[in-house]
Image (cartoon, rainbow, N blue to C red):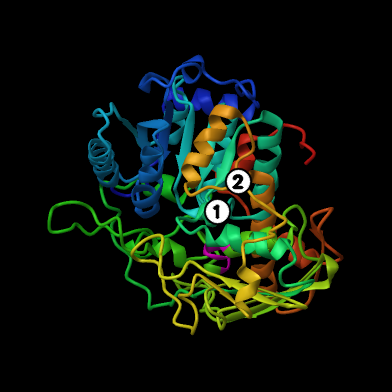
Amino acid sequence: MSDATHRPVRVSRRVFVQRSALAAGVSAMPGIVPARLLGSQAPSNRIRVGQIGTGRIGLSHDVPGVIRSGLAHIVALCDVDSRRLAFGRTRVAQLAAKGGLPAPDVQVYTAYAEMLERSDLDAVVISTPDHSHAEIALAAVLAGKDVYLQKPMTMTHAEGVLLRNEVARTGRIVQIGSQQRSWGPDEQFRKAVEFVRSGRVGQIRRVEVGLPVDPTAPDAPEGPVPSNLDYDRWLGPTPLAPYTEQRVHSQKVNPDGTPDVDSRPGWLRNEAYCLGMITGWGAHHFDTAHWGMNLEHTGPSRIEGRGEFPPSDRIWNVHGAYHVELTYPGDIRMTVSDRFPNGIRFIGDEGWIFVSRDAQAQTASDPVSDKPGALQPLETSDPRLLDPAGVRVELPHSTSHHRNWLECVRSRQTPLAPAPVAHRSNTACILSWIAMKLQRPLAWDSQAERFVDDPEAQAMLSRPERAPYGAGRLLAGRPAVAP
């Protein structure tokens, strides 16, 4: 599409019919496991997975994670960038060959709805920009597919409520990519949470969460839409905006002729598509903090924050430096700031435990914290707090988040990062962003999931959706589902 802002969007009859079915709430019966997944361990009964998004996270993390699990075949790929899509097909074949697997028969799609029509597709992995998470995940759930969804779960709180409720209604297995719950091989996050929940630091009083920031830069000039990119579909439910590579992702080609899928994409720094590091890495660290506090199904009652923001009309306009204070049940105070080392510190009456990813980054272009102590995976005020003897709380062990999800697709058990838990941690991130914007104390009713007597803050829990896209349109006309 050479000029997606002026050319009308063409929707095939198949896609139109499927969207109409989704809007009417037609979905597969929940909890049904295809017969081929039962019985022997023959390769023919591997889970058939479609990968939606063949960019940085998709090809460097999600595709390898699914293939290395040994439980699934990737049989379909989808992306709105045809160049990346073709490269994704090559990458899948390379990884399969490296693992000693037969060459896969991979079909490619530029429209996710066409992929979801396949009755032989059991599950999908969604590795797209944040602003499209809710629509694609909700469509997949309504189409009867199990889902691995990259974090943050949704861009807005309202989308999170829709998705969480439909997952509960349909019984689909949904794992959010909060892979610190499966961080290996040392499993330091699980161990830290076990120590904290076993009382090693005494009564938790405070939690400190350190996150990096993304820098801003001057705007790049507007340019023509690349012929390999369906820009209108990439924008999805967000407002129309002039195309520039700085807004989307790299269109550079490596010396070997492959597309550049490893550099940090520009959309991570624009608030139409991502809220910045407060949700980017915040989704990981808030999840670990909630896990450690044993408050995974609730949230804060009070939030106060401040943040530095570039001019809103700049392309890279996500927050810079920030400081947020949240109050949780039990009067636990959580402080989130770019001034802390990248990680989570649990502070109690009898000491503290700090946990981080150490020197490991998920992708080569991830920012690295330069704060002292940021590269130590597990620290404590007293080494005796990390003695494994006598740990009272033992949590599920996992060193592969994708394998945990696929095992649950087979067993229909709850995965380590299910939608209700991920929605709560993502909500705390979004509330922090709202507090940073408004820069005044906010009261939050975690049970009702709404701000107390604050219409301005309440309005920021949702966003308008540009037709014909958006999660809300998939459920238009249907009665709301209780959580």
Q: Looking at numbered disc 1 in the image, what kind of residue is underneath it?
A: Ser
Query: In the rendered image of this protein, does residue 45 appear above or below residue 310?
Result: above
Front-most of 445 and 462?
A: 445
In the rendered structure, the answer to whether residue 44 lies left or right of residue 328 reads left
Magenta segment range?
278-284
Residue 279 among those drawn in magenta: yes
In the rendered structure, the answer to whether residue 63 lies left or right of residue 283 reads left
Query: In the rendered image of this protein, does residue 92 appear above or below residue 437?
Result: above
Residue 399 among those drawn in magenta: no
Front-most of 43 and 457?
A: 43
Image spot of residue 215 (x, y percent): 43, 77
Q: Looking at numbered disc 2 in the image, what kind of residue is underneath it?
A: Leu
10 Å neighbourhood of mark 1: few (<14), some, or many (≥20)?
A: many
Q: Which residue: 45% across, 75% down?
A: 375
**Quarter of the image holding residue 443?**
bottom right
Q: CA distance from mark 1 to mark 2?
A: 9 Å
Q: Which residue: 46% across, 53% down?
A: 129
Front-most of 401 and 436?
A: 401
Q: Which residue: 52% across, 67% down?
A: 276
In the rendered structure, the answer to whether residue 23 lies left or right of residue 392 reads left
Q: Which residue: 37% across, 43% down?
A: 63
Asked if one can make out residue 136 in the rendered structure from this viewpoint, the answer is no
| Mark number, residue 27 | none
Identify the residue under disc 1.
178
Identify the residue under disc 2.
416
Front-most of 459 and 151?
A: 151
Callout 1–callout 2 Cβ contact below 8 Å: yes
Q: Earlier in the sequence, mark 1 or mark 2?
A: 1
